[in-house]
């Protein structure tokens, strides 16, 4: 694959990740974090546990990232800072999401911060891949 | 949740349900169109197309860019792709750009349907697609603040509000054509700024109303709007009229007097026909624009001003700058790149029905006319009209059959077609005058009201009168074009004035002879053989055959 082709495919892959993950992990988020814990939990469920649907079945943010990783990770440098941070954030999601229904407020806030970081890193990946 | 049965309709085309579901929750006054029972989003063009084609189609489409859907749903050809590496790449490419394929099909059906593409412009995969989108005035991409559901809902609300704005603001008629919609958007952005504005447009296109009803109110400026026609004041008095005068500045200046600049302090000064400013007045105006100061005639010091300038012309200011009539630096200062152009009426023929309704509506709202209509309704034996009765203007026979108003003013289709074909040299103003004359003649003329079988009172607008008015309008325009224009004295030199007079005469002859110098020579001397001398004189006076054509 030529350098130019590789750059094109990297950009396309970054755009795909931003579209499938970066956009939807914050899709239901209001401008200011909900003061009501129930509303915050419901929003995080929609954005992080039901991030996308495929054939009627819900896929979580973790599923979406892992699938993308398996197909496209190789196009990027092994030590890519955005992707390393993304991977850590997604791993933390994986730890917290199974118990979303019972998480206390500070953990919900942590999930919200993680979703912000994921969206930011997806944007950054696109910007860097477009140069 | 109860959905509004009226209100603008939005179609969501997205392989994911979340966009439609969130918009449905956030947008109270908007109908998200159903694709099937309980389903609020079309996942492909195959599902979207019948909705777009339907009679009650969408007012706006929200369209995703990337679609993860089967090959058989993927445009451009909806064929299975197979499983080779090339097929997988092709599938990925089609999925990544599917929204753009759908947009292309949408545009073939409806070139100006607003479409919100839920991706940022810089994230369009291919540059040629991105460039094409830039040229599409009705496709919107999302900004940073619009990537969430709330942001998207705000964007959709804003676009729908823009599209459903009233057709008029006061006496200024916007209509629905793309050019005026774009103008409206630009004025909304520019009017509140302190920037000087330049309006261009032919006579009667509404420049005055635009400043009075739209630009000045939108500016938010507390001071008054002062309108000044630069063509109506003798040149020797122009500077004093604009900038004021101090006592004793010249014979007759018996007191200090402010000019229109001061009268418009804190407000807007509308300078119409700006090309008629003298060179000195232009220089003073440039100083006012550049340095924010002006000087009364005879004063020894500058005075700061707080006036915002809106200038207007129906002349080709670029050309006037080239030939030195208008200072090029003044033109530049008026931001010609931001010039607001009002098109002639012939470029907005699709607006004629709405404009006719506006004019008729104003006519019917006049209490004097309403009283006369009521009297005629009674005289026709149709009983006492209600205070809330609506009247309507109808311009074709099929609509006449369908309308339910009790009082109708009717112009036959053939006559309306003549209206559409007319060049309208006097533009909106002329159209308003002609239609008002027709309505008046129908209302106050004898025997034009009749009762039809449905008990409606019909006033027939006279097609012959219309044709006479149109013929007269055309003749007036031609006469205005053909009149010898006496040049306004600029330099005070007899020689210069004589030269200008000769230029005017030769230009008129050039038009009459349709640019044929032999014909011009024949008119002037009786012999076409003198055409070389005519052409030489033409050129020596600084005239150009190419420019005159």
Image: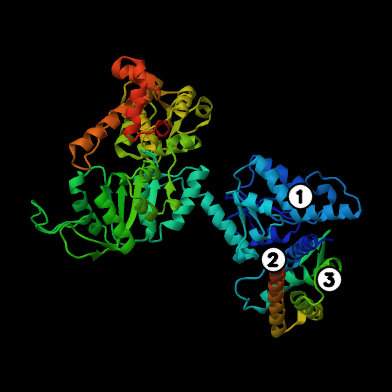
Indicate the quadrant containing the C terminus of chain B: top left, top right, bottom left or bottom right: top left
Q: What numbered label is drawn on residue B192?
A: none
Real-space Cα distance between discs 1 and 3?
26 Å
Disc 1 target residue: B44
Tag 2, which secondary structure?
loop
Tag 3, which secondary structure?
helix
User: x, y percentage for residue B354?
Assistant: 47, 38
Mark 2 chain: A
Real-space Cα distance between discs 3 and 2?
25 Å
Mark 3 chain: A
Disc 2 target residue: A131
Is A7 displayed left or right of B433 in the figure? Answer: right
Q: Is residue B480 above or below residue B281?
A: above
Of badges 1 and 3, the one in the foreground is: 3
Disc 3 target residue: A66
CB within 8 Å, label 3 to label 2: no
CB within 8 Å, label 1 to label 3: no
Is B236 displayed left or right of B471 in the figure? Answer: left
Q: Which residue occupies the foreground of this view, B316 or B146?
A: B316
User: x, y percentage for residue B518?
Assistant: 38, 19
Q: Which residue occupies the foreground of this view, B358 or B220?
A: B220
Q: Is residue B195 visible?
A: yes
Mark 1 chain: B
User: x, y percentage for residue B290?
Assistant: 33, 61
Q: Which residue occupies the foreground of this view, B444 or A14?
A: A14
Q: Residue at x 18, y 46 (%)?
A: B236
Of badges 3 and 2, the one in the foreground is: 2
Q: Residue at x 45, y 44 (%)?
A: B174
Is B493 displayed left or right of A22 in the figure? Answer: left
């Amino acid at each position: 694959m030529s350098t130019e082709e590789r750059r094109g495919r990297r950009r396309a892959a970054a755009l795909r990740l931003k579209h499938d993950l970066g956009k939807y992990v914050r899709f239901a988020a209001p401008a200011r974090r909900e003061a009501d814990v129930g509303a915050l939990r419901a929003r995080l469920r929609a954005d992080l546990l039901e991030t996308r649907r495929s054939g009627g079945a819900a896929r979580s943010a973790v599923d979406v990232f892992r699938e993308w990783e398996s197909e496209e990770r190789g196009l990027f440098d092994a030590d890519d800072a955005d992707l390393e941070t993304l991977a850590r954030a997604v791993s933390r999601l994986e730890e917290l999401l199974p118990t979303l229904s019972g998480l206390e407020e500070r953990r919900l806030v942590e999930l919200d911060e993680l979703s912000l970081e994921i969206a930011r890193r997806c944007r950054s990946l696109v910007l860097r891949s477009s140069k | 949740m109860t959905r509004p049965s009226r209100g603008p309709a939005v179609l969501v085309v997205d392989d994911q349900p979340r966009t439609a579901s969130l918009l449905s929750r956030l947008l109270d006054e908007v109908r998200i169109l159903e694709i099937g029972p309980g389903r609020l989003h079309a996942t492909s063009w195959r599902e979207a197309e019948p909705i777009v084609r339907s009679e009650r189609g969408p007012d706006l489409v929200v369209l995703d860019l990337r679609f993860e859907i089967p090959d058989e749903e993927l445009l451009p050809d909806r064929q299975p792709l197979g499983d080779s590496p090339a097929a997988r790449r092709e599938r990925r490419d089609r999925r990544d750009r599917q929204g753009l394929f759908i947009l292309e099909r949408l545009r073939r059906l409806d070139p100006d349907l607003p479409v919100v593409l839920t991706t940022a412009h810089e994230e369009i995969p291919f540059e040629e697609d991105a460039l094409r989108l830039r040229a599409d005035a009705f496709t919107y991409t999302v900004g940073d603040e619009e990537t969430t559901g709330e942001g998207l809902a705000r964007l959709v609300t804003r676009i729908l509000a823009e599209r459903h704005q009233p057709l008029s603001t006061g006496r200024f008629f916007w209509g629905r054509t793309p050019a005026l919609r774009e103008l409206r958007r630009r004025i909304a952005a520019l009017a509140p700024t302190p920037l000087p504005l330049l309006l261009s447009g032919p006579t009667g296109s509404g420049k005055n109303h635009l400043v009075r009803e739209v630009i000045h109110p939108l500016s938010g400026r507390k001071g008054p709007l002062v309108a000044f026609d630069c063509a109506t004041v003798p040149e020797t008095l122009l500077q004093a009229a604009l900038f004021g005068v101090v006592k004793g500045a010249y014979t007759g200046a018996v007191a200090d007097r402010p000019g229109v600049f001061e009268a418009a302090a804190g407000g807007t000064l509308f300078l119409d026909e700006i090309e008629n400013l003298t060179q000195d007045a232009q220089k003073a105006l440039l100083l006012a624009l550049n340095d924010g100061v002006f000087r009364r005639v005879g004063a020894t010091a500058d005075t700061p001003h707080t006036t915002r300038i809106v200038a207007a012309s129906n002349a080709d200011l670029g050309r006037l700058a080239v030939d030195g009539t208008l200072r090029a630096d003044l033109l530049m200062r008026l931001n010609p790149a931001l010039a607001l152009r009002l098109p002639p009426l012939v470029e907005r023929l699709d607006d004629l029905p709405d404009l006719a309704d506006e004019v008729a509506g104003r006519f019917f709202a006049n209490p004097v006319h309403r009283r006369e209509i009521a009297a005629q309704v009674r005289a026709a034996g149709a009983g006492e009209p209600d205070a809330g009765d609506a009247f309507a203007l109808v311009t074709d026979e099929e609509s006449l059959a369908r309308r339910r108003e009790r009082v109708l003013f009717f112009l036959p289709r053939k006559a309306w077609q003549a209206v559409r074909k007319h060049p309208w040299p006097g533009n909106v103003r002329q159209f308003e005058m002609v239609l008002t004359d027709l309505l008046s003649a129908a209302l106050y003329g004898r025997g034009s009201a009749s009762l039809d079988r449905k008990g409606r009172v019909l006033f027939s607008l006279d097609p012959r009168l219309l044709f006479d008015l149109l013929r007269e309008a055309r003749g007036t325009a031609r006469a205005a074009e053909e009149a010898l224009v006496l040049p306004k004295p600029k330099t005070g030199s007899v020689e210069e004035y004589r030269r200008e007079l000769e230029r005017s005469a030769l230009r008129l002859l050039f038009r009459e002879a349709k640019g044929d110098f032999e014909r011009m020579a024949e008119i002037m001397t009786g012999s076409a053989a003198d055409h070389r001398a005519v052409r030489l004189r033409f050129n020596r006076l600084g005239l150009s055959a190419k420019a005159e054509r």
